[in-house]
Amino acid sequence: MRVLHIVHDFLPRHVAGVEVYTENLTQRLAAEHEVAIAYSEVVPDAPNYALRRGRRGKVFTYEIVNNHRLRGFEETYRNPAVDRRMTEVLDEFRPDVVHVQHLINLSIDVVRDAKRRGIPVVMTLHDHWLECANGGQRFHPRLGLCTTLDAQRCAGCTAHMTGTGLGARGWLRRRHARAGASEEGLDLTTLAPHVETPDAAFVYRDAYALDGAAHPTFVAHPPARLRFDVETGRGGRFLAAAAMHPDTFERPGGAVRFRVRVDGDVRAEETLDPKRRAEDRRPLRIDVTLPAGRCAIELETEAVPAGRADYCTAGWIAPRIVAEQGDARAVASPWLRPMRAAARLAARVPRSQQRLRIQRRWASMRELGELVDAFVSPSRYLRDELARFGLDAGKIVHCDYGFATEGFRRRTDLPERARRYAFIGSLVPHKGVHVLIDAFDAMPRDAELEICGSHDYDPPYTDALLRRAAHPGIRFVGGIPPERVAEHQQRIDCQVVPSIWRENSPLTIHEAFLSGVPVVASRMGGSAELLEHGGGLLYDAGDADALAAQLRRLYDEPGLARRLAASAPRVKPMGEHARELVGLYEELRSARARAHDAR
């Protein structure tokens, strides 16, 4: 059988759960079948949408260059240029079955193309991407979980994915410009600046992390200039922090120069290059003295060198004006009043337009659901959630992941009482590590917690975690390569999964089961499902006191860790999982043949 797998990105540059799972599955399938993988990759020096062929063991690979030069929101999920490359892949490989792992960075119309050719299509549900255009997590860093789908809220959350200029994300409130000062000074993000930029999509309101919290931010992808006409009393100062977005750190492209002008004169100039200098991955504070009275403040960003502006998303965090004496206020210059009116209109019109785009995307995803022959959901939770969204529940097969079990062995030396705890994963807010640190502060002083995750993805959040960690037993050990996880599990007594978003079927929980290590996890989504019959303890997500109580139980109760580990459910080996999927492929091919014969 010839099987084509399609995934959003792939090894070796992208090492995450879906990619590792796809690698292990396709290599196992390739022992008995002809297998290929099609995926996207950013390759700045290659022509956009070039198709590059290769091999990975016995698996053929088709890499589609996608440098993310998109013309609009719809191309984030329906991209004609990607469709043309996928047509070439289908023509060349001639699959008997297409198995979609993920379509972010690609295009949903490959499914329609496969159906026109009479090829059965299977799609694995790894997350909420069919519902959620902004990453597929249905989690907002500031507003938290999206418990219900709301097109208006989604429109705000995805405003940065359109060309609507100053359209802000839904969770950042739009406040009208006001005169006068507050204790924090005049917040410039409440004003409508005069903007100079070659593309209106380069400038918008967002929020970036500073000192462990989200702050209103003017995003200004270079080249961009924002001008504010203000009036301030004595001792006036302009305060802000300059930063590039963490998503740019591992991407190609140049640095960004941030410049502050006051009445045309340069008063501050700094260049950040986080792609090559780790110290530039933290926000840089800027403090500029202002003259009393009226002045014009200009905030400029430019790429360095000028021709390397790809992946240079940059922002002015918490820009404000404070004064020792008197107020700071916006000056109602002749152009400012109409600019404010235009900004208020822009805040409404793009949001309504983006709401319609979101609704059209949902309609497209439901049409995709009608075309796919079978969905595979690793958790009952995600199966039920996507059925509520509109997928045919009869098409969704509940089938958990298979795992490459080589290297894992169950611990036989767990202590009577747990002392060594660990978190393994990404150090990002939705993983809930801050909740774990707060909970661990209540643990006895001889308890130990290893926090295993790269510090590079979200340095401000990591810095906040480092400052928050008061317990003497907490250690930040950096990321652990996948091939070393089994070894690491032999050194811990409990795996903690404190997520504050709804995970599907977390890899780390399965790895703990394979290693004979008990788990403490938040009572959400697939995590709660995996632990419902044993293997660990649950607590209410986000509740540090409840988490501390469960960690303390393992510390205090003799034999509890061993009993929980012994009650863990079986983890499916990858060979067994591959046979399940082959059975599904053959069933769909037979059904297609019968339908063809009936015609």
Image (cartoon, helix red, strand yellow):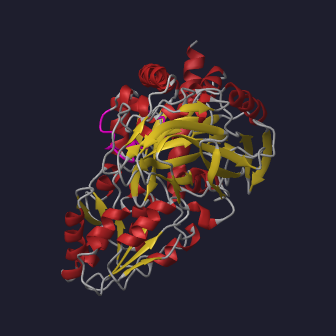
The N terminus appears in which quarter of the rendering? top right
Q: Residue 182: x and y, percent? A: 31, 46
Quadrant in which residue 482 is drawn: bottom right
Question: With respect to residue 198, does 253 lie above or below?
Answer: below
- Viewer-nearest residue: 506 or 297: 297
Q: Is residue 136 magenta?
A: yes
Q: Residue 376: x and y, percent? A: 46, 40
Q: Residue 173: x and y, percent? A: 36, 36
Residue 552 placement, left or right of 59: left
Question: With respect to residue 563, does 138 lie above or below?
Answer: above
Residue 326 placement, left or right of 293: left
Residue 305 placement, left or right of 273: right
Question: With respect to residue 351, does 560 lie above or below?
Answer: below
Res 71 visible: yes
Res 1 visible: no
Q: Is residue 137 magenta?
A: yes
Q: Main secondary structure of the magenta part?
A: loop
Quadrant in which residue 223 is drawn: top right
At x 33%, y 30%, the residue is 388
Range of the magenta residues?
A: 131-148
At x 20%, y 66%, the residue is 545
